[in-house]
Image (cartoon, grey):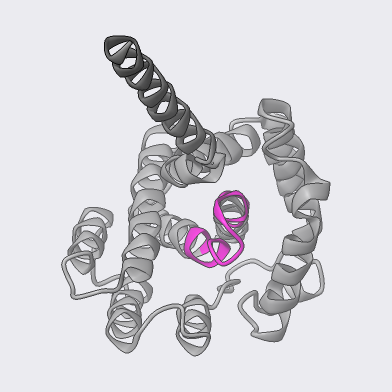
Amino acid sequence: MKIFKFYLLLILTGAFIINSCYQEEKQVQPSDNLTDQIGYWHNIAVGSLFDNPAFTNYVEAGEISYSEIRDRIMKELSRKDVQLFHYESIREDLLWSDRVLSEKRILLSPFSGNKRVQGEMPIDFAAVFRYLYDTDEIGETLYNSFIDLNKKVLSFEVSREEIIKLSRQIGGLPLSTKEKSYVDVFNQVLYYSDNYWSKNHARIQDKRTLSIIWADAAGGLYGMLCGPVCSIIEAAMFSSIMAIQE
């Protein structure tokens, strides 16, 4: 009888452990893994636009608005994964993002009137970093590091390769866990963006590519305020705006 109870206890204990592991596994959210795929999905989104002659012809033909670009990005992404990129599920986040982009003047005058203006910088990258700092998402050390790199990019003091290397070095600073996650996303998008633009649009001048990949990374960073799906969309948005503006 004692042997029977012993084996019964072993069986019940094993069942409990297996069930607990299963419950733990179920609690893992898709977004946990999606954060590691932001750069990948960013390239899918940008490629669906700029590798499409119909889109590039449309851009060259005249004006294009921020909302038109976003709609096209969402449409293309939903074709790849309709559940992940379902507009209604992130609608409130995107509306909030629009308000911030406007109120904090992150998107500047060339797009405020839904018009494409040649030769003007359409995005205030410093405003992105400042907004994250003002909302206590990042501390002074990380903020100053981003601002320092931003100055180097805008003055073209560095090459694409150099800015990627310098940006990675930021990860070695004494940062909080949250800050490290922001830096990881920033560097991930920077790397994937450089990969896409340098390989698929090699004709673009190096200085211009530097501005575009910096925009992509800043967009990915800003979008993380709403989560990885918004990060993908905003990274692709910033990329598209900079690419057609240059």
From the viewer's side, name the closer residue of 184 and 243: 184
Image spot of residue 110 (x, y percent): 69, 73
What kind of secondary structure does the magenta stretch mostly adopt? helix
With respect to residue 226, does 22 lie above or below?
above
Image spot of residue 168 (x, y percent): 22, 59
| Whether residue 119 is visible | yes
Specify whether residue 66 is painted magenta: no
Specify whether residue 225 is painted magenta: yes
Q: How many marks?
A: 0
Quarter assignment of residue 107: bottom right
Q: Magenta segment, which residues?
A: 219-234
From the viewer's side, name the closer residue of 102 and 24: 24
Quarter assignment of residue 117: bottom right
Q: Is residue 221 left or right of residue 109?
A: left
Image spot of residue 100 (x, y percent): 68, 78
From the viewer's side, name the closer residue of 214 and 156: 214
**Residue at horizontal 54%, vertical 45%?**
31
Image spot of residue 73 (x, y percent): 70, 43
